[in-house]
Amino acid sequence: MAHGKERKEKVCLNCNARVFGPYCHVCGQHNIEPKETLIGLVVHFFNDITHFEGKFISSLRYLLFRPGFLTKEYERGRRASYMNPVRMYVFASAFFFIIFFSFFSRSGDEIINVKAPADSAGFKIPEVNINSNTLSEEGLKNAETAEDSALIKKMFGAKAKTETSSNDTVQSTGILGIADNRYKTIKEYDSAQAALPKEQRNNWFEKLVVKRIIIVNEKYKGDLKAFNKAFYEYIIHALPKVLFVSLPIFAFLIFLLYVRHSRYFYVTHIIFTIHLFVFYFIMLLILFSSNKLGTIFSWWPSNLLALIIWLYMFYYLYKAMRRTYEQQRTKTLLKYFILLFLSLLLYAFLTIMLFSYSIFNV
């Protein structure tokens, strides 16, 4: 559908090339008058939207129900009829993580505050912190005879001693059991380390951890719950970066499995991985939504649907490999299990790196 009046001049306004039809054969710009009416602008907008939706819907249908089909079509050069893989990944990942953050991001109240339970009348039961010293004092206050007082002191004396020694052990051992937890500043810790003999000083890793603990204590004022909340949020918001980094690595693992097949370039494996990741984004969104419905409606079969989704996700990878790389079932199954094992190692390593990086940057 035309968006405006076609120009009589056969010179492209964008690249100055000679035009032999309604569109420039060099840059593709439509050779129409530059002055556009409001109606033309609205028509242009809706045409672009429906064009995008048409490609997206058709691509989505093949992506969900014909594993490996889009990758195979891309390899054959049939690309105009389907949504560009990179654009599809950007759109799907952005939509996925918007929903993901809404499901898994928590406010400070949800993490830090611990609400007291309510009794049957709806009144909150106050939280009471009871220790051995409190019980001992209450017992001595209510003792009627000297024998009762002596018995109470005998009963609670050993317990109080045990608690005191336990607290002393925690204080002297410190966080992670590698250093004293009494240092308030790094300068104080460095001075204490310098005063010790070389054989009694912490090694480089222990120093690194202890200094980080001191920084965290200073930053969060010793509030462990506030640190946990910040640590959780940091990890959640770092997941898109981890997945983006893992994409070319995962594609490289597939490249190693099919390295003897010269017809498949590394870019082919990248396209295959993009389509696979987009499929997993969609499946995980369905899974999260199903679990959410299960918390709202008791009759919703969330566990059954979760099982079906996970089984289909595992089956999908095998079927996509089989259709894309066109190998026998036995070889495909062998490479499928090898890829699963390598993927497990890859994401275990990335998870450890994410936690380590988060601890030293939160």
Image: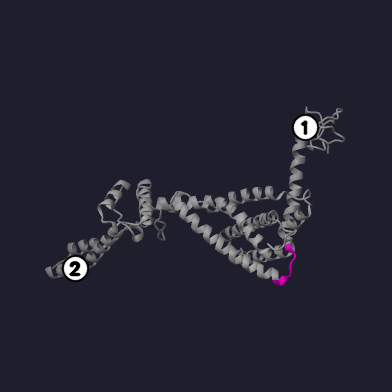
Residues marked 1 and 2 touching at CB (< 8 Å): no
Based on the picture, tell me whether residue 328 belongs to the magenta stretch: yes
Three-letter code, disc 1 = Cys
Based on the picture, tell me whether residue 216 belongs to the magenta stretch: no
User: Which residue is at a point 87% across and 35% down the rendered structure image?
Assistant: 20
Three-letter code, disc 2 = Ile
The answer to which of 45 and 213 lies nearer the viewer is 213
Tag 2 secondary structure: helix
Question: Eyeballing the image, is 189 above or below 343?
Answer: above
Judging by the rendered image, the residue that carries numbered circle 2 is: 152
The answer to which of 303 and 313 lies nearer the viewer is 313
Judging by the rendered image, the residue that carries numbered circle 1 is: 15
Whole-percent x, y for residue 89 in the image: 66, 50
Q: Residues within 10 Å of mark 1 (few under 14, many from 20)?
A: few
Q: CA distance from mark 1 to mark 2?
A: 97 Å
Task: Give the image quarter of residue 250.
Answer: bottom right
Residue 106 visible? no
What range is drawn magenta here? 325-330
